Image (tube, rainbow, N blue to C red):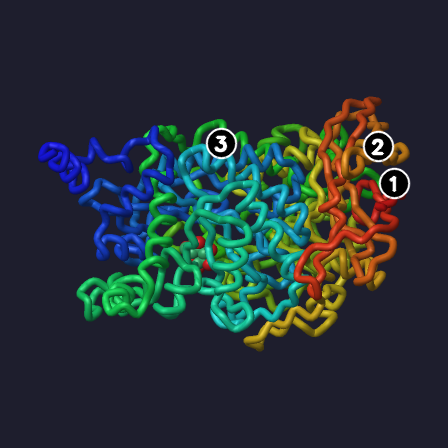
Amino acid sequence: MVMATGIAMASACCTCPETAVYLDESKPLEDRVEDALSRMTLEEKVKILHAQSKFSSAGVPRLGIPELWCTDGPHGIRPEVKWDQWDQAGWTNDSCTAFPALTCLAATWSEEMSALYGKSIGEEARFREKDVLLGPGVNIYRTPLNGRNFEYMGEDPYLASKMVVPYIQEVQKNGVATCVKHYALNNQEAHRHSYNAVVDDRALYEIYLPAFKAAVQEGGSWSIMGAYNLFRGEHACHNDLLLNKILKQDWGFDGAVISDWGGTYDTVEAANKGLDLEFGTGTNGLDSKYGNSYDAYHLAIPYQEKLRKGELSEEVLNDKVRRVLRLNFRTAMNSRKPFGSMNSPEHNEAARRIAGEGIVVLKNEDNILPVDLEKTGKILVVGENAIKKMTVGGGSSSLKAKHECVPLDGIREAVGDKAEVVYQRGYLGDLLRSYNSVDTGIDLSDERSDEQLIADAVAEAADADVILFFGGLNKSKGQDCEGRDRSAMALPYAQDKVIEALAEVNPNIVVVIVSGNAVEMPWVDKVDGIMEAWFIGSQAGHAIADVLFGKVNPSGKLPFTFPVKLEDNAAHATGAYDAESHVAEYKEGIFVGYRWAEKQQIKPLFAFGHGLSYTTFEYGEAKCRKAGKGFKVSIDVTNTGDREGKEIVQMYIEDVESSLERPVKELKGFSKISLAPGETKTVTFVIEPDMLKFYDPAQSGWVLEPGDFVAHVGAASDDIRSSVKFAVK
Ligand code: BGC
């Protein structure tokens, strides 16, 4: 009896780590979490709920629970910064592989590419001993002015939902958590810390939440990042509806909610409204009244004091601690995770493949593409974006890439001595060559006037067999960059003028747009070729050359609509977007992107889902049959050209009659298939009843109304090849 008590006491207060359940990886996760929790003091619990440096949070040293280390995200692993500052630490071994921006990944419409992306970036995160990768981003593309659209996956909730899942799963196989961001309604950068998103329930559930839900429920993301903005008057980082109700209660999320850096405002709010881990809160340096500025965080000593006084619930505290412990056990404390790798040939190859599948050929008149080097004597390359490194800049996603091949170098390498390549600058854009101490090493200064630059380019144009104009946007403030929105949709600098001037002399022009956003193209009819090349990272030059010269047959399609002008976009047409206002009223409701264009019958410049190939595809007749509780739609697709190629077959559903207005049609399936010349494949889409539902605010839920539906199958939202009707009884 005495002995038994002695043993029981020994195990209850045992601090020998090797006997502890929480350290035993063969034990169920929840048992380990409860065991660790039961051993922690109040101070230790609070200590793990906030940062201890710019990108790390403390563990529980007494229990051998390690720190957690985060990194941006989402296109490569951010160079190391100083402990307490944004400045670079100046390491020489933290250069990464820069992968294509997420707009490009979305443009691949390939779950295989998403998996390859996740695997590769996860391995790099692991090699750098990071536990949490701050990404991917899945905020919906609502306006072409949003400075951060390049970090997201386009305008369609179905596409973003499908594309985000493999990325997450593959990253996490490395014992590195994804932190899907920015949850939620972070669709602009203007007043990003203070705008209040006013969104109706239907738009919330149908448009803005599905990709986050898929990330949590299908991807199984171990963490999620709260957004800066407010939603219905509450900051998203402590928002009862978004975090406690929808994310944790309805979706069953068991991971940790991490604040965006500096997105936490109040101890009681943060404690009660769903935040688990606080990062980046502004402090007054290291001289706070607690000695260490991180102790002054909302979820630090101020929280502890309120807990001690009994003003806040310990049960709620324990829930947060459990979530952070889970995150820790899944990552930092996972002893079975692989070692990872950095800048491997495989990662560079992955970056090149993903870019090659994401580049979108928008226009190809007279088959100007691919450029046939057998018939080309002189290639004139014009434009700043042919020589600019784009992995540097843009905010928190800025990288220090080990290699970055700029387009001009990629072209020169591919052309070799088969043709003459002449370069002209054409216009001056942004001359900045470094960002956050990462120096591109490229001097962009040029003394020439705008007129002279144009004249010099035009002088080389007349006898060129083809002109490749490289323009678009860059990563400077006010363009594709965090912290501010664009002020207009037009191309910046003198680009339009240069293109017009070149076109007057020689129409054999391919305009290559490097951007993460739609741009206006007033010269669209004057050039033969247009390509959206995105920001594609380390292998940019190689991947672009692959497509330009036909080594790769393009197969990317647009993940968002290119309107002709800003007023054709719903947020602008309705006057809802106002960069000056601190209220963002989503007046367009569910009619975002192509949903708006189709409702208003506005012809876009380039439609959602559009993208050309160097071969041609013929579609058969769509057929629908009942299958279980739902339906199956099948269609034959044949490669009728003479090159192997990949086609993204898209299925949109139309609800013929509905009690609430619905979009003309909505994407509900896609499949990327590879076809040899002459080959036919049958593509089959499964339609589950859930996919036919809409969100009815009056019933606070999803509703399936019986009646007729139409499945439209085609090559783009504006290129439907066959439609088939079916009825839900
Ligand atoms: C950004 C996040 C980023 C964080 C850390 C914030 O300003 O909004 O996306 O992960 O900084 O760099």
Instruction: Give above or below for 292 relative to 506.
Output: below
* Crowd band around label 2 with a 10 angstrom C-alpha radius: few (<14), some (14–19), many (20+): many
Give residue 400's position: percent from left, percent from top. Answer: 41, 45
Among numbered discs 3 and 1, the one appearing first in the sequence: 3
Question: Given the image, on which type of amino acid does mark 1 rest?
Answer: Arg
Q: In the rendered picture of this protein, how many numbered marks are placed on residues?
A: 3
**Hey, what amino acid is under mark 3?**
His
At 40% from the left and 30% from the top, the residue drawn is 341
Q: Which residue is mark 2?
A: 635
Residue that mark 3 sits on: 347
Seen at 71% across and 34% down, the residue is 672
Distance Cα–Cα, label 3 vs label 2: 35 Å
| Quarter of the displayed picture in which ligand 1 can be seen | bottom left
Earlier in the chain: of badge 2 and badge 1, it is 2
Q: Quadrant of residue 269?
A: bottom left
Does residue 78 appear left or right of residue 472 in this picture? left
Q: Amino acid at mark 2?
A: Ile
Residue 19 falls in image quadrant:
top left
**Between disc 3 and disc 2, whose residue precedes?**
3
Residue 641 or 27: which is nearer the viewer?
Answer: 27
Q: Residue 185 vs residue 376: left or right? A: left
